[in-house]
Amino acid sequence: MPESYKKALKEYYEVEKEGEKSHYLIMPTPALLRDLFVQRIEETNNEVDAIIFERFFGFPYEKNNAHKIKGIIDKFRPLVNFLKDKSDLSEIKRLDALAVVLNYPNRPFKKFMHLSKKEVDNLEIEDKDVIEERNNLIAADSINLAEDEFKISSEEVVPSNKKEIIIEKVIPKKNKRSKKIVVISLLSMIVAISLFLNIKSFTTKDCMIWNGEQYQAISCNERVKGFVETSVPKDEKLINHFKKIKVSNKTSFFDVKGNPKIWYVKNANGTLDFFNAPGLHPETGKTLKPITEYIIEKYILQ
C-alpha cells in the first residue's frame, strides 16, 4: 500500500509542478520545499496537517509558529531526492510531509489507504459470510447425524446355500420425536445468534458507494447493484462536497485569482470526466488533474 501512495504522490507532483506553485516544484531544492511547506501549513491550518507537522519535525505545531522551521533544511533533502528519483522514501511521516508540500487532497496515508479501492477489504462482509458458512455446515452436520441415528440398519450376508438373515434395529417413535425437537431447537439457536451478531451491520451506514454522480452513505453489508467491492469507509467531506459534473462553455472554470475550480481525468472509455473538487476518480482510481485552458479549448469549446 505505501507503494501506491508513493505512485499517487509522484503523479500529483507531475501535475503540480506545471501549476500555480511551479517555481517551487519544477527544480525543487530543500529550501524551496521548506518554504512551500510553511505556506501550505499556514494556509490549511487544520488538525490533520498539524499532526503531520508534529510527526515530521518532532515538536507540535501552533498557529503562526511555522517560522520555527525556517532554519531547518536537511529534513527536506530526502523529499527532493525522492522527487528527482535519486532515492526512495520509506517513512510514512516523510511521505505525508511531501503530501502537504504538494497539497495532495487525499492525505494523510491513512485516508489514502481507505479511499484506494484496490486495497479496500470489507471485513464485515467477510465475517458475515464466514458466520453463515459455519452455520450452514453445523446445520448440515446436525441433520446428517440425526438421520443416521433415526435410520440404523445392518445386513449380514450368509453363504448362498443358507437363508439370508436381516437384522433391523427399530428406534421407538418417542425417541425419534425427541431428537427432531433437539435438531430444530439447535437450528433456531444458530439463526438467532447469527441475527444478533449482524444486527449492527444492517442498521448503520458506515460505508459509502459511488453511484455514478456522487458518493452516498450505505451499510457496509448493503449490496448496491451487486458492486459491494466498490464500497469504502464513509467520508462526510466526500459525500457532501465531491461530485461529478457536466461542463459547457458557460461553466466557470477558474476563480478570481485564476485557481482551477474544475478537475478532470480520462475514464475507462477514453473520454473526460469532470469533477468539482480534486481527488481520485472513484471508478478508475486515477488522480484528477486541474483544468487548463488547453483542455477547455480542445475538449469543451470545440
Image (spheres, rainbow, N blue to C red):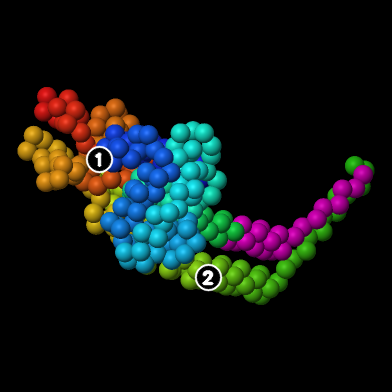
Quarter of the image for residue 153 reads: bottom right
Amino acid identity at mark 1? Glu
The spot of residue 48 in percent (x, y) is 38, 60
Quadrant of the drawing holding the C terminus? top left
Residue that label 1 marks: 20
Residue at position x 50%, y 61% in the image: 58
In magenta segment, residue 204: no
Residue at position x 78%, y 60% in the image: 168
Where are the magenta residues, as a range? 135-159
Query: Going by the picture, which residue comes out furthest to the left?
Result: 250
- Depth check: 38 or 133 in front? 38
The spot of residue 198 in percent (x, y) is 47, 66
Residue that label 2 marks: 193
Task: Say if 42 sits above or below 91 in the image.
Answer: below
Q: Secondary structure at mark 2?
A: helix
- Depth check: 28 or 150 in front? 28
